[in-house]
Image (cartoon, grey):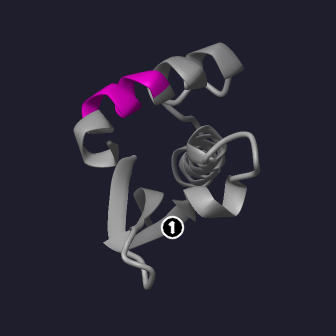
Amino acid sequence: MTLQQTPSKTGGRFCSWKINWTEEGKVKGRSFAWSSYADRDNNGSWEAYRAGALCRIAADLRTHGCSKIDPGEDELRALFHQAMKIYSSKVA
């Protein structure tokens, strides 16, 4: 999963988590926008990450019958925090 940023119409940044996978020889992908999962208490980054991870798990199960991503909440949160450390300079 990678962090995507695109300029918004208001001059800010639009952040989303991008996932890619190959299915039946074709590269497929999907983005999960933070703003789609945001509310007044958070920016939606964790919720978007979780939705992206679950989508990737489903794609892995369809194509390979198993997934390297552990769907456990603690494990997903650990991966999320690791990703945020990597991308923190881009989000700041």
Q: Main secondary structure of the magenta part?
A: helix
Q: Is residue 89 left or right of residue 25?
A: left
Q: How many marks?
A: 1
Does residue 49 appear left or right of residue 29 in this picture? right
Identity of the residue drawn at 56% across and 62% down? 33
Q: In terms of depth relative to the viewer, which is nearer, 22 or 4?
A: 4
Residue 26 seen: no
**Few, some or many residues within 10 Å of mark 1 (<14, 14–19, 20+):** some
Q: Nearer the viewer, residue 92 or 85?
A: 92
Q: Residue at x 26, y 47 (%)?
A: 90
Foreground of the two, 56 or 77: 77
Q: Is residue 84 left or right of residue 36?
A: left
Name the residue located 36 percent from the left edge and 51 percent from the top edge: 3
Q: Is residue 43 magenta?
A: no
Q: What's the amino acid at mark 1?
A: Arg
Where does residue 82 sit, x and y in percent of width and height?
38, 23
**Residue at image coords 76%, 48%:** 40
The residue beneath circle 1 is: 30
Q: Position of residue 17 (x, y in %)?
A: 46, 54
Q: Residue furthest bottom?
A: 9
- Give coordinates of residue 70: x percent, y percent: 58, 24
Q: Is residue 42 visible?
A: yes
Looking at the rendering, which quadrant does residue 53 occupy?
Answer: top right
* Residue lying farthest to the right in this orientation: 40
Check disc 1 and report its element: helix, strand or loop: strand
84 is within the stretch colored magenta: yes
Q: Which residues are magenta?
A: 81-86
